[in-house]
Amino acid sequence: NEREYYGALYVPGSEPQASLVLIHGLTERGVDDPRLHDFAMSLARVGFTVFVPEIESFRQLEVHADDARDVRDAVEWLLAEHPRAAAQPLGVAATSMGVGPTMLAVLDDSVAAEVDFLVSVGGYHDMTDAISYITTGASIYPRRNYRYTPNEYGTWYMLRSHAERVESARDRELLVRIAERKMADFEADVSELVADLGDDGRLVYELLSNTEPDRVAGLLERLPDAVRDELAALNLAQRDLEQLQARMLLIHGLRDNVIPWQHSRDLQAAVGDERSRFYRVRGLMHVDVRPGPVSGWRLWRAGHALLLLRDGQQTF
């Protein structure tokens, strides 16, 4: 069945040298986010034809393994509508939780051979650890440099994201209302909404409102089957990433307060050093750039690696 999508296409003023499918993050503005527009324009100025597809669930602040289909469709559309893309280097770029569905798409046989490179900014590897970090501030990785406070917005958008998998329509509605009220005001009282939750809704809420690291694994095990299966499907740590045919460029902030930088290190290890490069940047706060002299230099090096991928270099 044919599916309809909305998207934005950015074309270089001069001869294009490569094509890039740019996947927006979890934002209600979707392809209309001005930060995304500015980034796509910058890429077009250096020779990329950039296609930014609207990922509807990301605009709803949700992320699912099935979103990989939308990424695949975007790649196939670009190849079909712009035949030159098939003759030039073709990449896909994603950020944060969007890296999961994007990697699943690029691993799929339908497009795996067509995608030359993959760019990940602030991506995750192990879903269990990502949930623990977002909700409790604790990770399996040591945090030696500073004390971490959980990112509350990340907690509530994850609740919003996985509410859809709860079977009860009433629980789904309540979980969405809880998440949206908390995202608007972290101090908001949601006790009356929590009190109305059924068993499945309460299990999801308990996991994502939990602040005790030792409870995370047990709470995950108790989740409703559909939610647990969805998280397992998104868990890149359970995938054979050595099968990735594309070269991979990974960029991650050293003080990321949503996903630890070690996730990108582990992604690189899983893909293999020969096909990937990883840049740690101190001035990158998850996906927002605040560089100093040293981090600016590392961002420049990452940008240079991207230009090498644009030019079809076998090493970068």
Image (cartoon, rainbow, N blue to C red):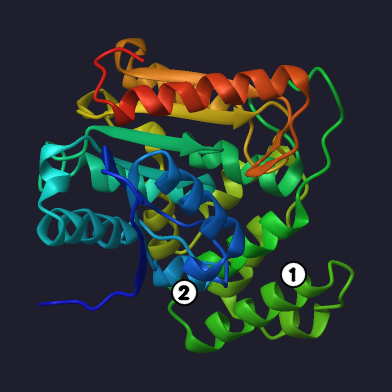
Relative depth, front residue between 180 and 47: 47
Between 229 and 150, the one nearer to me in the picture: 150
Q: Real-space Cα distance between discs 1 and 2?
A: 17 Å
Task: Compare residues 165 and 26 and report the one nearer the observer.
Answer: 26
Q: Is residue 313 above or below residue 230?
A: above
In the displayed structure, does residue 289 sit left or right of residue 217? right
Of tags 1 and 2, the one toward the viewer is 1
Type of the residue with mark 2:
Glu
Q: Which residue is mark 1?
A: 183
Q: Position of residue 138 (x, y in %)?
A: 73, 34
Residue at the extreme bottom: 170
Label placed on residue 164? 2
Place of residue 217 in the rendered image (x, y in percent of width and height, measured from the top left)? 58, 42
When the figure is inspected, residue 160 is found, relative to residue 265, above or below; the finding is: below
Query: Are the residues flagged by discs 1 and 2 in contact, CB closer than 8 Å?
Result: no
Q: Quadrant of residue 207?
A: bottom right
Q: Name the kind of residue labelled 1 in the image.
A: Met
Is residue 30 shown above or below 72? below
Q: What x and y, as percent, mark residue 296?
A: 68, 24
